[in-house]
Image (cartoon, rainbow, N blue to C red):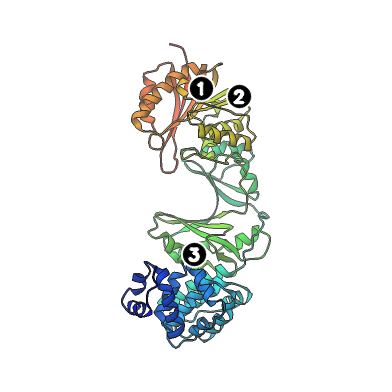
Amino acid sequence: MTAMSKDKVRSLLSQPNGTEKLSAKPEIVLPAAWELFTEEANAAACGFLCACAKQKKLRENIAMRLQQDRAPLWEALQSPVSKMRKNAARLCGALANPADAPALLQALQKEDTRFVLPSILLSLGAIGGAEAEAALLAYTVEEGDPKHVAAEKEALRMARARCATTQKHAYKGFAKPVLVELRTPKWLSESLVYELKNMGLSPVKTTTAAVTVRTANLPALYQARSFTELLLPLGKCENKLQDIADVAAPMGEMLRACHDGEPPFSYRVEAKGEVPDRARFAKDMAMLMDGPLLRNAPSDYEAELRVEIGKSARVYVKLFSIPDTRFPYRKETLPASIHPAVAAAVLRYARAYLKEGDRVLDPCCGSGTLLFEREMLNKCESLTGVDIAHKAVEIARGNAAAGESRAKFVVNDCRRFIAGRQYDEVIANLPFGNRVGNHSENETLYAEILDKLTDWMQPDGTAVLYTMEFTLLKKLLRARPALELVTETKTDAGGLMPGIFIIRFSKRI
């Protein structure tokens, strides 16, 4: 492949969108662009090198060219042309060579053009090191044009976050009880209330999808299995950025109160609900929150600032410094796998019908989650999982080993599975149709499974079925009087609204 001439590259770089035009085949342009940069101090050529540096192979090529002599790059940082200084700073950041830090620090001290400063700050953050970190911590943004001030503040925040040494803090606990909101699958909060009361905790508030308690012992809450998230409420306010930041302001002191070690604490911003631009919201929040106690680090955090926006904004802290070890069996999943906390909540909803010592069958076991959670509810004589997919059974067996479960798994089409001895319970996360298979296939499958229930179960046996196909299931049950629908409810699962059906095999027809 023939390299492009210097004259042609110079000509193209002088045209509108010249860098973009040359980026189609950067490897044949780079040699000429390098000459234009080092021999003619061409700012556009330096900008093209910045674009090349996004690719590892080309970045290594540029780094090799600078290995013997970095003077062209350092001289460009002192160029009388502001665009050259900006592009040279960008190139330093892309290469992230500590040897360039002194030249960047000198450039930072001398720079008086506002649109150049963000590139220098970001490059110092990319390079890191004690000197760069000290300079960034000491740097203050002067007032001026709001657009330039905002860009400079954002660059400084990002540079400090990237440059700072990440310190992990050990959770030590709260000295006094705090409010804790435990999220549950919708309409299954009573399952969690049942668990908490068995733990000696009385709810402060219960809604359809959350239970609030007051306690100082947060790790002990993980004895309960049927909640999906543990959040610390900070308050609610109007949907205005500054109001949200004011409500979130105690976050830093809260983290310091319950962790060993000195601040800052690393965190991320998570916006949910009616938020048009989540990335912009997260950046704006971080600019208001960052300081001596908090450092925004979206890729390496120990806490989350959760903002849920609807008619008003609700603000929470979510800790990642308390390990959730409830589901050791969850080593591998399938696309249609039920979440373990949802499985736990479903089974506790049905707990009055699930007796100790029962023999349990899951004819559509997938990765085994329902059986593992059934084993946690009370002692079973046996647990058997059946799935038509070899991969599913392989995953379920691996998960059983990881969780030290007694459940056994069989590869078979459940419609051909014959129970050597009838079961007391059948539990199943049935194919939804919009996740596995389709509705027309499920019409036949569901009918055959319901017909098999009377073969699989003992008289007075119980089936707990979880499915989105609730209309179909109820229609099929009406045609099978031996199967009595004892109770039903709906819940939520990733935006879907599945139903839970408890069915009793009441008599033989």
Q: Earlier in the sequence, mark 3 or mark 1?
A: 3
Residue 60, given in percent of the width and then of the height, sits at 52, 69
* The label number, if any, that marks residue 62 in the structure image: none
Residue 309, given in percent of the width and then of the height, sits at 42, 55
Which residue corresponds to mark 3? 245
- Between 259 and 18, the one lying in front of the other is 18
Which residue of the protein is positioned furthest toward the bottom in this rendering? 80
Residue type of the residue flagged with mark 3: Ala
Q: Tell us which disc is closer to us: 1 or 2.
A: 2
Q: How far apart are marks 3 and 2 (CA)?
A: 53 Å
- Between 337 and 193, the one lying in front of the other is 337
Q: How far apart are marks 1 and 2 (CA)?
A: 15 Å
User: Is residue 256 left or right of 474 when viewed as pictured?
Assistant: right
Which residue corresponds to mark 1? 462
Residue type of the residue flagged with mark 2: Ser
Q: Residues within 10 Å of mark 3 (few under 14, many from 20)?
A: many
Residue type of the residue flagged with mark 1: Thr
Q: In which quarter of the image is residue 299?
A: bottom right
Residue 156 visible from this viewpoint: no
User: Is residue 361 left or right of 406 when viewed as pictured?
Assistant: left
Q: Distance between the residues labelled 3 and 1?
A: 51 Å
Which residue corresponds to mark 2? 382
Would you place residue 335 above or below residue 474 in this image? Answer: below
- Between 441 and 328, the one lying in front of the other is 441
Residue sitting at x 64%, y 63%: 167
Q: Earlier in the sequence, mark 1 or mark 2?
A: 2
Q: Do the residues labelled 1 and 2 touch (CB within 8 Å)?
A: no
